[in-house]
Amino acid sequence: MKPVLLAVLASVCFAATESPLSLASIRAVEASINDKVRSNLSDPYDLLGTARGTYLDGYGAVFSVEMNLVLVSPLNLSPFKPSISEAEIVGMQKRKLAKVENLKDAMRGLMVGASKTLTGLPANEHIVMEAFLFNYRWENTRDLPKRIVITSTKQQLLDAAARRLTGAELTKLFDDQEL
Amino acid sequence: MNICERSEAVSDYAFDEVSGTERAEIERHIESCAECHAHLRSIRLTTAALKAVPNREIPQRIAFVSDKLFEPSPWARFWRGFFGSPTQVGFASACLLAAAISFSATRKPVEIRTVIAQSPAKSDVTAAQIDAAVSKAVAQVHAEDQKFTQMALAAAEEKHKKEHDALLVSMRETVDVMQRRMGAYTSELASLERPSFGGGQ
């Protein structure tokens, strides 16, 4: 009797944690995020933590990635270059500020793509993309976000993909947060 | 040399100052007149010789050697006259040397007098007091110097420590970033090697 009860309990537990999303679809979205981050050859992002996706039951799929907006040479400060000039600091901040909007556009595009890839995700659930932005200590981080979180529902994203919305119209569908 | 009556016309011909009909007539005359032929030849030679001489600018001023402008000054005349003669130069050198020897032989050495000023006997300040004051002043200056040196050393050490700390932090940060970057590459490589799953999570 006891083994039967255990078997029933185990099957109930597994049934409760079963995900509507396949691991392959999550991996595919992760790969597309990594590829997108690395794709800008002229002024690339520095991918410091590859995309990680997870499904939160009843809420949706959440993807997070960690990067530096600008790929900086590892020896930015060394015994041979003991200080960083003010001009370099100001230049870095300007470059990063300019790239924040580009990154947000890229994230929105990735989310629209993910809505088609994540076939098992219910339409009323969310797709969230979160980017952790790394800054060196010597940088001037004023006006620069540390995290960017963009949220939308799968249905909105599918509609956007179907209607081929312009950039401004697409932006309205997302809930952007800069933290 | 006889002069032909038409020599003037030949000169005009030589300088191209005759008309077409006259030119032909003169040419015929020159062929028949040896004098005019010789005259024409001399004119041409002269012209050619003049053309060979380079043009020169007309001088702006003509001066004569007797002008006072070219007359040397009395000092220059003496100098040139003196050094123009090796004998005179030799004689003058010998005189100068003799004078120098005579002067050094007759000259007495300058006596250096050392004057030791004696302090008044009835002065209130004693030597011991002066020594004490000097020692005190020297000690004070020495102490101030030491203080300034220590302050400068402390400031330099602090600056060095700050720079060292900043460098260490930066190096740690750089190493951390490189590790993360390598981790990202490794992770991506691993995902490429990993077989894809078709089933659910």
Image: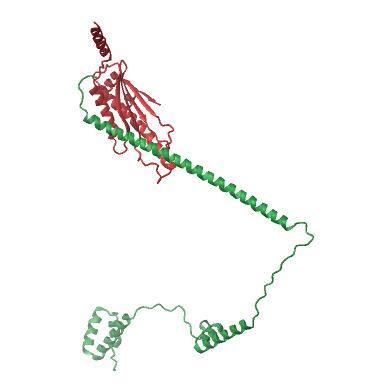
Colour chain A is painted in: red
Colour displayed for chain B in the image of the structure: green
Q: Where B91 falls versus A137 (above or below)?
A: below
Q: Is residue B56 visible?
A: yes
Quarter holding residue A15: top left
Say if B55 sits above or below A5 in the image: below
Residue at 41% x, 38% y: name it.
Answer: B170
Whole-percent x and y of residue A166? 30, 26
Q: Position of residue B73 (x, y in %)?
A: 55, 82
Q: Quadrant of residue A86?
A: top left
Q: How is the image coloured?
A: by chain
Q: Residue at x 39, y 43 (%)?
A: A78
Vertical side of B172 occupied by A151: above or below: above
Residue A46, located in which quarter of the rendered image?
top left
User: Is residue A46 shown to the viewer in this render?
Assistant: no
Position in image of residue B99 (x %, y %): 59, 84
Q: Is residue B188 left or right of residue B174?
A: left
Which residue of the protein is positioned furthest toward the top in this rendering?
A1
Between residue A30 and residue A8, name the one nearer to us.
A8
